[in-house]
Amino acid sequence: MPERQLRMVRPDLEQLPVIAVPAEYELRTYRPGDEAAWCEVMNTGIGTDWTAEKCRRELTEREPFLPNGCFFVTKSEEAVATACAFDVQPEGLNAAQVHMVCAKPAHRGRGLGRLVTLAVLHYMREHDYTAAFLGTDDFRVPAIKTYLGLGFVPDYIEDSHRRRWSAVFAKIGERPS
């Protein structure tokens, strides 16, 4: 059985940083018909087989999808980064999931992943969630650094996670919490 993704939790949604959109970009929410543009972004970092139909079937037509909690960063109307909130609450938490965070390669390193993640967190707080969680992969070190900077902490949900988190923290030069 493959190991599950690492999980991170932001235990509260208080004191979120202010959303600041870089001058050449715009931030907007999902619009019906965005599936093809969403797939273009996701196919650059979250798999390679996303189609508009698969996106509808697995994301936008599923009950956990929150259309107003799905954000796109655009440049000249082209979607270049995205993240969304899914109403999937783990046991014991009034939390939603930060899901499908991705930016196109030409736009990475500009804080757009942080921007869309932060927009999702603000959405969650405005809709009475009190915490957030997400899944990530060990090799997504830049993303993990972003999540740590936004107040997420490791959530050790499997026996292997302490070892895996230790390896991640060794890569980024920090000590696990």
Image: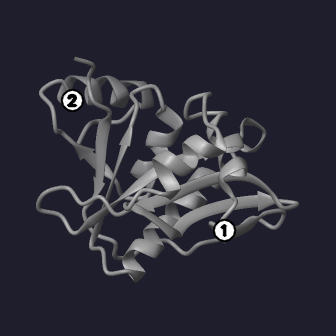
Residue 10 picture location, percent across and down:
30, 59
- Residue 47's tag is none
**Residue 111, visible in the rendered structure:** no
Residue 143 picture location, percent across and down:
50, 41
Q: Residue at x 76, y 60 (%)?
A: 74
Q: Secondary structure at mark 1?
A: loop
Is residue 75 placed above or below 20 in the rendered structure? above
Residue 23, image quadrant: bottom right
Residue 25, image quadrant: bottom right
Within 10 Å of the Cα at label 1, are there few (<14), some (14-19), or many (20+) other Cα atoms? few
Cβ–Cβ under 8 Å for marks 1 and 2: no
The amino acid sitting under disc 2 is: His
* 75 to the left or right of 58: right
Q: Earlier in the sequence, mark 1 or mark 2?
A: 1
Real-space Cα distance between discs 1 and 2? 37 Å
Q: Residue at x 13, y 57 (%)?
A: 91
The amino acid sitting under disc 1 is: Arg
Is residue 28 placed above or below 150 in the rendered structure? below
* 152 to the left or right of 140: left
Image quarter (top left, top right, bottom left or bottom right) of the C terminus: top left
Q: Residue at label 1?
A: 31
Q: Residue at label 2?
A: 161
